[in-house]
Amino acid sequence: MLAIYKRELKSYFCSFIGCLFIGVTLFFIGLYYTVYNLTYGYPYFSYVISSVVFLFLVTVPILTMRILAEERKNKTDQLILTVPVSVGGVVMGKFLALTTIFLIPTVISCIYPLLLTKFGSVPLGEAYLSILAFFLYGIACIAIGILISSLTESLVIAAVLGFGILFLGYMMSSLCSLISGTGNILTTILSCFDMYTPFYNMLQGTLNLDDVAYFLSLTGFALFLTVQSIQKRRYSVSVKTFSLGAYNTGMIAVVAAILVIFNIILGELPATWTNIDLTYEKLYTLTDQTKEFVNNMTDDVTIYVLVNEKNQDTTLGQTLERYDDLSDHIMVEYVDPVVNPTFYTQYTDSSLSTNSLIVVSDKRSKVISADSIYETAYDYSTYTSYTSGYDGEGQITSAIDFVTRDDMPKIYFLEGHGEYSFSSTFTASLTKENVDYSTINLLNYDSVPEDASSLVIYAPASDFSEDDKNKIISYLEGGGSVVTISGYATADMTNFDEVLSYMGLSIADGIVMEQDSGYYYQSQNYLLPELISSVYTSGIYNSYYIFAPYAQGIVIEDESSEELSYTIFLSTSDSAYSMIDVSVTTATGKQEGDIDGPFGIGVEAVKELDTGTATMVLYSCELLFTDEANQMVSGANLMLFTNTVSRFVEHTVSVSIPVKSYEVSTLLLSQSQIVLLGLIATIILPVGCLIAGFVIWFRRRRR
């Protein structure tokens, strides 16, 4: 086999075809690389791979047409058939030679994503998975090209037939859709030769062993058929003789059946076993929050998907498959709206679009519109909308919690003292957490309502009245829970301070300044507090920063109190101090009278009472739960907020899963860098290969 391999590899480079194939492949890869990645700044190398795969329809038939057809035409195949090498060894040697030629541009393309990392964030996992998909698709095409070359002695017929077969494989998914939108026996059979769908699936960022097995099976079966094609000419087999090495129709059927069964079994395995999520934001991987929540489920839930399963949204389909595998309490069923157009009317009066979900339990149901699964944004430079995030997991986990809960918890936002208002980003997280919320002015109530799971006090600008103070303290004395976000205020806040003091807490004067550079961002009052493991920092601890600009210091008044216990989960460094005179610039450093740290930035105080347990969570930064601060740390502040809410609505884990962003920052290249890298990728490398091939061919011609 090694001798065949060397002979074929040498012949392709001597005939110029090998270098031509490499040069053309590198040119088109370089061209799309220059356009998408360098010029437009897209960080996704999969865009390049998706655009160049059409090349296989032309280049592979030209590369493979002579591999066996020319042998038959020149009658040199008789020499191969009589050499002391098995037919399988001959075929494999030729296949490996062609694979080596194809491997050269594939390996060179592996350098391109690494170059992009110099100019911004690049999802390398997705990039190299797309290159793997490119390679697997390519070797399958090569194997098919070799098979077709073995069936004829005409190079033209081999090339044309190869193009036709590969074109069918490339277009089979569309052809099946034209034959039947709902699928039938014919489309099921034809889809076995759908080469593009497994390739496309891998471009989405998931290494699915089903797709890898498909390409390897197709490659192996094509090579097996090539061996059988040659064996048919090499051996004369009697009906009484059965040889694994000889041409045998029954053996072809057996091998085909084995491959089909193998792929079917692999397809039935749980997605968690066969799928590896390589996307930048782990789009298809269920978070620990969802896993913990689902593992604690006791009710059965059915998720109806309004689409024919063959036409489903691939991203949503992968997410649903993981839910289905995660628990026996979750069942996913597909309802074809063409076959059953009125199914959704059992659950809603509104019309639903394709790929919408209906989550159903014995208690209630909830509809998830297809539009809410993806987050969109508007690009004002092009005046177009685009998909910016994927919220499949967030919507589904929230819906499962909604349909399985016995009742809906409620929290109240205090108003009447100039309090801050939460943005839609944070109130939307409450909706996903299945928490009912409303504002309350205690002036209109005798007490905090009994149905309050928690009372939220968000940075009052003026002090409480004596009556409001007493109502809040009375609520705490009854075992209530209060979430307080304090802000820097110049007004007298005596009654507000007394509410904090009831829980043994107070706020230090001034603004916290950090002297340890690891605890702030750019400015000493833009705090990045230390995260300490707790229920509030779950999913954030050791993974994210919390951004707390212009925070004040929380002081625990009496840590030795027997009835009070404290948990500090956001803390400054030991070198932090509180600057009393906020008009002084940070450049002057610590001044006389400033208060030494460390301080808490997020503290839980729990008070054991005869009537119950009073709990207060105090944050000392009024800007903590704003969109601006949240965006600075990729949504970590929002996660802190939802963890805090879930603590008081009897959720063992937050069910408000943040939207998974599709956005990776655009690559930034200067014009000279674009020109230089573009020239290398589109001109120097391809032309260099062509020149090398021409020199080798020309020298051989002169001998």
Image: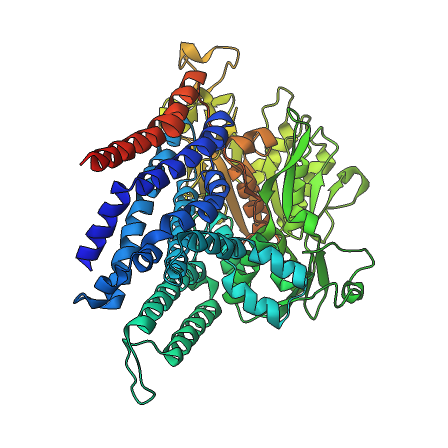
The quadrant holding residue 703 is: top left
Q: Horizontal and vertical percent for residue 441?
A: 76, 38
The answer to which of 113 and 69 lies nearer the viewer is 69
Q: Horizontal and vertical percent for residue 161?
A: 47, 56
Q: Quadrant of the N terminus?
A: bottom left
Residue at left 64%, top 24%?
A: 381
Q: Horizontal and vertical percent for residue 696?
A: 23, 35
Q: Is residue 296 above or below residue 594?
A: below
* Residue 652 visible to the viewer: no
The answer to which of 275 and 522 lies nearer the viewer is 275
Residue furthest to the front in view is 74
Residue at left 43%, top 76%?
A: 257
Q: Is residue 63 above or below residue 112?
A: below
The quadrant holding residue 426 is: top right
Residue at left 33%, top 35%?
A: 111
Q: Horizontal and vertical percent for residue 246?
A: 29, 76
